[in-house]
Amino acid sequence: MRASKFVGNRQDGVSLMGLIVTLAVLGFVGVIGMQIIPSYSEYRAITSAIKTAKEKGGTVREMQQSFDNSATVNYISSIRGSDLIISKDSGEMEISFAYEKKIPLFGPASILLEYNGTTAKNGVATAPTEK
């Protein structure tokens, strides 16, 4: 008698239950990613818009208007020019912003993203002054 190549009928691989769980986790991560990516893209557009507003210079109102113009073109809806913190630091105008974005998931669960940025070289946003 010849010896068989296959001594056992043991199969290796992923079980159906393992595949279902893996796909569910990947689907959940994908859904969250599809909600976070547009928010992050908007944050990058805001950062670019404040740099452009600073480069154009002018008065505080002109910088706010420049930001609002960029916001219109880049579909920025989270903040407006009036929400920017514009101050003079070391003789140079600096623009800062901070905002939160709440992304609902299901039921009472949600994700809170906190964004902030500045044009200051040291990367530290100036605190808003009280009116």
Image: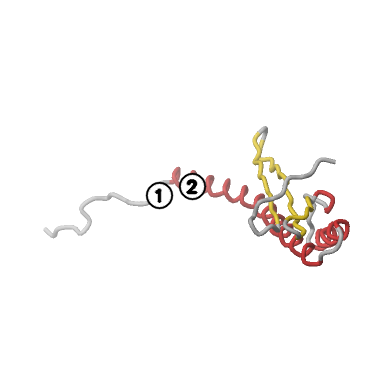
Residue at the extreme left of the image, as rendered? 1
Residue at the extreme bottom of the image, as rendered? 56
Q: Is residue 106 above or below residue 33?
A: above
Residue 116 on image: x %, y %: 69, 50
What residue do we see at 82% from left, 63% from top? 73
Residue 112 on image: x %, y %: 66, 41
Of 126 and 44, the residue lying toward us = 126
Amino acid at the residue labelled 2: Thr
Look at the image and tell me in which quarter the C terminus lies.
Answer: top right
What residue do we see at 81% from left, 40% from top? 130
- In the rendering, which numbered label is found on residue 48? none
Element assignment for label 2: helix
Quarter where residue 92 is shown = bottom right
Residue at the extreme top of the image, as rendered? 108
Q: Is residue 123 above or below residue 16?
A: below
Viewed as shown, does residue 24 lie left or right of 114?
left
The crowding category of the residue bearing disc 2, from other C-alpha atoms within 10 Å (few below 14, some 14 to 19, many at least 20), is: few
Element assignment for label 1: loop
**Mark 1 or 2 closer to N-term?**
1
Residue 19 on image: x %, y %: 46, 48
Residue wearing tag 1: 14
Residue wearing tag 2: 22
The crowding category of the residue bearing disc 1, from other C-alpha atoms within 10 Å (few below 14, some 14 to 19, many at least 20), is: few
Amino acid at the residue labelled 1: Val
Q: Is residue 52 above or below residue 79?
A: below
Of 98 and 101, the residue lying toward us = 98
What residue do we see at 84% from left, 62% from top? 66
Mark 1–mark 2 distance (CA, rounded to whole Å): 10 Å
Q: Are marks 1 and 2 in contact (CB under 8 Å)?
A: yes
Of 30 and 99, the residue lying toward us = 99
The mark lying in front, picked from 1 and 2, is 2
